[in-house]
Amino acid sequence: MKALFIFVLAMMILLFGCATGTQTRNENMKINKSFEDDDNGETAEERAAEEKAIKENNHGTEKAASSEKIAGNTTSYLRYTEATFNKARNENKVIYLYFYATWCPICKKERPTILDAFDEMKFDDVVGFEVHFNDDNTTDEDRAAARKFGVAYQHTTIILNKKGDVSYRSLSPILKDEIISNIREAGGS
């Protein structure tokens, strides 16, 4: 009974940390260290291997000169850089921003949905960016973007219309069709 109480308490702390964005990935890893599997059935070793693969694929290198393409053929989903973001703004594109943390279970669940949406879209006037938030891949440019848009939590989605105004903002999970629909409402076609 005592072990169950400790487990429930630890899970509440983990989920609260993800929701508030105040805990770092390392703090969450310390909490999870005592458990063999997380709520997705993934072991600590599998999580470490995934994070290593992300780093090896240059998702969020500290000195990202240009945006790395993460998904999309026609409609690109890129690793955020200020230069590429500014280029998209100057071209009056609809911009999708997702503030992502490698340690966040909500982000981890939403990411495949986002990638699928960008792989499916055929919009020339839209670009998406993955902006790292409070994880080991977060750059100064990521932090500046979070400040600019008043983002206090990871798993935040923001869509800017062609004028650069925020047309959609949410912390809630979003389905692929909703992503595409909200982008269309912002002027993407």
Image: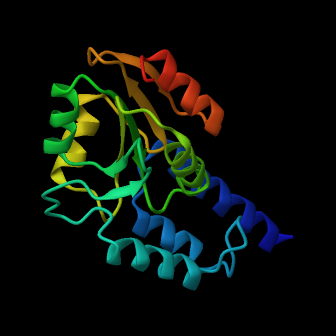
How far across and down, in percent of the image, does residue 129 sit? Answer: 35, 44
Q: Is residue 98 left or right of residue 172?
A: left
Q: Nearer the viewer, residue 37 or 50?
A: 50
Residue found at the very far bottom of the displayed protein: 45
How far across and down, in percent of the image, does residue 30 sit? Answer: 49, 74
Q: Is residue 88 left or right of residue 59?
A: left
The answer to whether one can see residue 163 in this image is yes
Q: Is residue 104 left or right of residue 35?
A: left
Say which quarter of the image contains residue 154.
Answer: top left
Q: Is residue 46 above or below residue 154?
A: below
How far across and down, in percent of the image, does residue 156 sit? Answer: 46, 37
Q: Quadrant of the N terminus?
A: bottom right
Q: Is residue 156 left or right of residue 177?
A: left
Q: Nearer the viewer, residue 38 or 35?
A: 38
How far across and down, in percent of the image, does residue 6 sit? Answer: 72, 67
Q: Residue at x 33, y 56 (%)?
A: 69
Say which quarter of the image contains residue 54.
Answer: bottom left
Q: Quadrant of the C terminus?
A: top left
* Colouring of the image: rainbow
Q: Residue at x 68, y 82 (%)?
A: 36
Q: Residue at x 23, y 45 (%)?
A: 143
Residue found at the very far right of the displayed protein: 1
The answer to whether one can see residue 131 in this image is no
